[in-house]
Amino acid sequence: MPAATVDQQGRLYLPARIARRLGGRGLEIASVSAGHVFLTAEGSENPTQMTGVLGDISVVDLLSFFNMFRKTGVLRFDLPGGRKDLYLQDGEIIAALSSFPAESLGEILFGLGRIEPEVLDRVGRRADNQNVLVKFLLEKNLVSASDIWQAVRHQAETIVYDLLSFQEGSFSFQRKTFGQKDPFQLSMSTQNLLMEGLRRLDERQLFTRLVPSLEDFARPSGKRTEDLSHSEGQMLAHLQGGDLPVRELIRRSGFGEFDGLRVLYHLVERGLVLIEGEAPGASQGELGLILDAFNDGLGLLFRRLSPCKSDLHQEVQELLRELPQPCSYILRDARLREDGTLDSRRILANLAGLEEGDKMRLLADALGELLYMECHIARQVLAKEQVTELIGAVKAATARAKDILGRN
C-alpha cells in the first residue's frame, strides 16, 4: 500500500489514485490511537465498520466472526494480485465476486468444459460484467441456464476456497442491506464452506506429490485395467489422442480443478497415467523457438529497466492481467520469472486447446503486445536516445521469431 504523509500543519497527502477514488469527499475520523488513524469518507451510504490486515487474523477467523454474529454486508479482501468481495446475509455467504482472471465466470465455464476456447475469445470484454456476459451467452445459445447456475455456484465456492490460502492482504467490511433477491443469489453455509475449504487445502497438498503442477503434461502409461470408476475411465479416454497439459485434461473432463486433480491423482497412483514436466519436444518445436525469442526481448527489457524502477516486476504482472482478448487468454496465469521472462509451460498449456494453424500467430501477437507495453514503460523512465537503443536491441533479439512466422 503506497504511503500517505501528514505535514506539520496537519495536512494529509494521499497518493493520487487513492484520492481519485474518494472523489473529493471529506474524511471523518472514525477511530484513532497512537498507532493508527481510521478515516471514512463523508456521506457514504454503506459505511465501513471494520478494516484491518491479514496475518495474525486469518480469513477463517474473520468469516467465523461474521458468521457467529450474523452480520449483513460486503466483506472485501484486497490481496496480492487482485480483490475478492463476499456478500453476507445474516452471516451466510449469498454471493462472491473476484477480480482474479481465473475466477471470472467465463474462465469458470471454460474450466468446467461448458464453453470452448473460441467462445471464450468471443466473450472478450463482456467478461468484465457478469450480467452482460450471462445475457450474451444465453441469447446466443452458447450455454444453458443450468450451465450458468452450476458455474455461478462453482465460481462462488472457488473464490472462497482459494481465499483461505491467503495470509497477506487487507480487509474491510461495509454494512449493507440487500433488497429483492438476485436470480443468482446463493444460499451457502459459511461454516460448511470453511470446513470444506480447509479439507481441500490438506488434500491438495497430497495431490501435488504426484501432480506437482497444472502446467505439467499427462500421458497414458499403456498399463491396462478393467477396474476403473466412471470418472477415471472418462479422464483416460481424453488421453487416447495423445499427451495433454494437466489443466487442459481436467478442463476437457469437465470435473472442475479440484475434483479433476483428485481423479488424476488416483490414476497416477495406480500407474495408469504418467506426469512429465515438459511437453514432449516442446522446446525444439517452433512454438518453443518463438517463446525463446520473445523471452530474450523481455529479459533484455527487464535487465535494463529494473535498476530504474523498483516495482517493475509487480507492474509487469499487472500488465499481464490487463491484456485484451485473445492475448489475455494466451498468457493467462503465465508465471513471470524473477528475470522478467515467462515460464513456457503455462503458455503452451493455454495454446493446447487452440487450432494448430492459429497457435504461432496468436502466441506472437500476445507476446508482442506485452513487449509493446513494456517498451511504453521504457519511454517513461529512460532518456529518448536510451529508449531508441533499447528498442533496437529488443527488435534484434526477437527477429528470429519473425523469421519463423514468415516461413509459415
Image (spheres, helix red, strand yellow):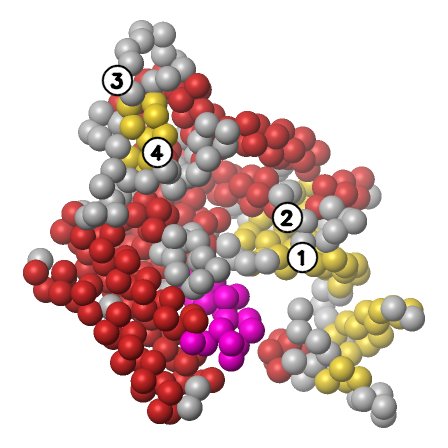
What's the mark number on residue 375?
none
The furthest residue to the top: 226
Q: Residues within 10 Å of mark 1 (few under 14, many from 20)?
A: some
Please report whichever mark, 4 or 1, sits nearer to the chain's N-terminal start: 1
What's the mark number on residue 276?
4
The furthest residue to the right: 34
Whether residue 338 sits left or right of residue 44 in the image: it is: left
Instruction: Give the SS element for disc 4.
Output: strand
Q: Amino acid at mark 1?
A: Gly
Q: Amino acid at mark 2?
A: Phe
Please report whichever mark, 3 or 1, sits nearer to the chain's N-terminal start: 1
User: According to the image, label 1 marks what residue?
Assistant: 169
Looking at the rendering, the stretch of residues picked out in magenta corresponds to 304-321
State the separation of the CA atoms marked 2 and 4. 29 Å
> Which one is in front, 353 or 103?
353
Q: Amino acid at mark 4?
A: Glu
Q: Residues within 10 Å of mark 3 (few under 14, many from 20)?
A: few
What's the mark number on residue 222?
3
Whether residue 360 sits left or right of residue 350 in the image: it is: left
Q: In the picture, residue 52 is in which quadrant?
A: bottom right
Q: Residue 193: x percent and y percent? A: 64, 35
Please identify the quadrant where the C terminus is shown: bottom left
State the separation of the CA atoms marked 2 and 1. 8 Å
Query: Are dots 2 and 1 in contact, CB under 8 Å?
Result: yes
